[in-house]
Amino acid sequence: MKKEDIKFLKERERKFREGDLPFGAWTLQTKTKWWNTIELQNVLNPLTRQKGRKLLDVGCSDGRFLEYFNKKIPGKVLFGIDFAFNPLKVLNKLGFPKHLICGDVCEMPFKGQVFDAAVSIQVVQHIPTRPERIRCLKGICNGLTEGGLFVISLVNQKRWHETVENGKEGNSVNNPSLYVYLYDPEDLAQDLDEAGFVDIKIVGINNVPEKYLKWIGVLGVWADFGISQLITSLSLRRGCYLLAVCRKKGKLGP
Ligand SMILES: C[S@@+](CC[C@H](N)C(=O)[O-])C[C@H]1O[C@@H](n2cnc3c(N)ncnc32)[C@H](O)[C@@H]1O
């Protein structure tokens, strides 16, 4: 794909994100509390064991995850980056300390090994072309301290194949402003490896259909966790999202 086409696709998404209801607010309105809890808690779980203080949310939007994280593990130094300014303005008004940057996640502005952990939720799938996605992932890896943890959640190709015409990548049939690349566990592992991450573990999450969560509530959160951990191969086929946990090579941070 030509440089100007990549620029066009990114700009088309950025404009959409500026004008639309921010993603965090949208999920809270359209999904059940338990559906959101399953995704956010699965991203949070590995971070509870991570040493160090600085966490980066890549493509943070209006701070759905940063707010959740801050409630569960207060006192950390939180950073967020997103290219849409309006969702960042919403996040900025939330009453907890954080550092926000408006910019492209493929051109990380950080110098040196700054973060002890990073997360990215439903973002990298929207970056057009593999070299750009790798550039983003490498930027995240470079910004981590040695042994720094990275947790990424993305839509699962096996569940979302009907959302793009060829089943893998292109314009979303549900939203013509969005480009989507649908990861499967194999190419996700490959891209994380190429970006320099090690100890890559991938599971499927949000396995329990949302309609049942309404009835079983918190039990569904536990059931979902059980499916991811105990019947991982099923979760990789049935989970709505893929969750990868990996590290930058080297010793654990301080
Ligand atoms: C589906 S939303 C997810 C938001 C948030 N991570 C969450 O889960 O609530 C995708 C976000 O990624 C941002 N994004 C997509 N591509 C980006 C890029 N190249 N640089 C910076 N932000 C980007 C969008 O602006 C949007 O806020």
Image (cartoon, helix red, strand yellow):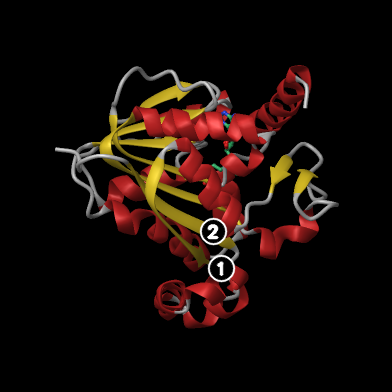
- Residue 118, percent across and down? 37, 40
Residue kind at label 2, given as amino acid type: Leu
- For the residue pair 81 and 247, the one nearer the viewer reads as 247
Circle 1 crowding by C-alpha within 10 Å: few under 14, some 14–19, many from 20: many
- Residue extending furthest toward the left: 254
Residue 131's quadrant in the figure? top right
Please tell me which residue is depicted at 58% across the width and 56% down the height of the picture: 186
Check if mark 2's residue and mark 1's residue have beta carbons within 8 Å.
yes
Residue 234's quadrant in the figure? bottom right
Q: In the rendered image, is residue 93 in sight?
A: no
Please tell me which residue is depicted at 75% across the width and 59% down the height of the picture: 161
Q: Which mark is residue 236?
A: 1
Q: Which residue is mark 2?
A: 242
Under circle 2, the secondary element is strand
Q: From the image, which quarter does the N terminus lie in?
A: top right
Please tell me which residue is depicted at 29% across the width and 26% down the height of the picture: 113
Residue 212's quadrant in the figure? bottom right
